[in-house]
Amino acid sequence: MANRFGVLPFNSPVEPTMDYSKVAPLIGIQSVRHPPHDRVTEVDVDRWCQVMRDTNPLYTDEDYAKKSRYGGLLAPSGMMHVFALGTMRAALDQFVRGAWEHPNDPNVKLNVVIEQEGYTGVMATAQRQQHFRRIRVGDEIHWTIGISRLSDYDHLTRQGVGRKYQILYQFYNQKDELLCNQSFDVLVYRAPMSTRRLYAG
Amino acid sequence: MSREINNVYWEDVQVKQDLPEKSRVIDTTLIAMGATWATHDFMPVHHDRDFAQSKGAPDIFMNILTSNGLMMTYLEQWAGPQAVIKDISIRLSVPNFPRDRMDMNARITRKWEEKGEHLVEVAFNGDNQMGPHAAGTAIISLPTRG
């Protein structure tokens, strides 16, 4: 029942909620393995190091890196996710025209549903990277993506009423060696509803 | 290229030891270049102020890849090139906006040996004027003097 402001209380049984059955089949499935747009280059690493002010000689000094136990230049492990992100053209296709580069991926199918359900805001909230091997300059980073979990109820957050889900990335090099498992927590939210619920108290 | 290379050795660190604090001024260039140039994240909320404001944000804000990169760099710059970050978890709270400053600090919370590696766990924070921007833990493999 609405309160004196005409607003529905949180968890109202008459509040429309997401149909979980539409998304349940997407949980726990990894995508096919995607190839990289390009090899890991010294230019990629240099740009990262300039922005982060990273002076680690394993990334910036070829002579030092060659004499190290790695035998050559590395990329910072924190760059792992960078190599799974698409080109600027692909990003604009996605964000402006809604055309995803990998439309059959489970996270893309999930995004279609949650947008239809009115969760238009999106925010990354957490990330975990477990690193098993270093990235070498010249590597080709292949990757898969999946949804490892999705909340089956709404959360009241500072951003609004939302759902939380967790993406699992797995990164491999050209030798099929697993480099990294990365979880990525995302909040999707209905911003206007949050304002209504905050007034509802 | 000659430069002084400093490494932190496992024998020399202690649980409850604080890492030296570092600060980073957060400006539009860092946020926009961090997103697009360094981390290939072309989501417009990280480089287009009009777009960010149309989504309800007061300004562009830092993407998580840059936040993670700044914190990992902070830890690696302390530990030296022989160290390896094996595992890192980071949670974001208040965003980093232009004209913020992020103060980074960390403390060693655990020290142990496992499968021939000499490890420490570090709890770290990156705070701006509004409160905690990033917080998390990292497991770092350190070299030994032996």
Image (tube, grey):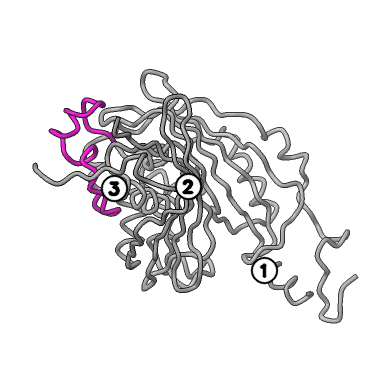
In the picture, residue A15 is in which quadrant? Answer: bottom right
Secondary structure beneath label 1: helix
- Which of the numbered marks, if any, corresponds to residue B110? none
Of A131 and A158, the residue lying toward us:
A131
Which of pointers 1 and 3 indicates the residue nearer the eye?
A: 3
Query: For this rendering, which residue is in front, A117 or A189?
Result: A189
Looking at the picture, how far across and down is residue A120, in whole percent?
A: 61, 57
Q: Which residue is mark 1?
A: A192
Residue A136 rendering spot, x and y as whole percentages = 29, 30
The answer as to whether the residues below labels 1 and 2 share one chain is yes
For mark 2, what is the residue? A94
Badges 1 and 3, same chain: yes
Q: CA distance from mark 3 to mark 2?
A: 24 Å
Q: The disc labelled 1 sits on which kind of residue?
A: Pro
Relative vertical location of residue B12 with respect to residue B100 in this rendering, above or below? above
Q: Which quarter shows the N terminus of chain B?
A: top left
Q: Which mark is residue A48?
A: 3
Q: Residue at x 55, y 29 (%)?
A: A31
> Type of residue at label 2?
Gln
Does the stretch in magenta take in B40?
no
- Cα distance between the residues tagged 1 and 3: 37 Å
Question: Over which residues does the magenta segment extend?
Answer: A49-74
Image height of A160 relative to B77, above or below: below
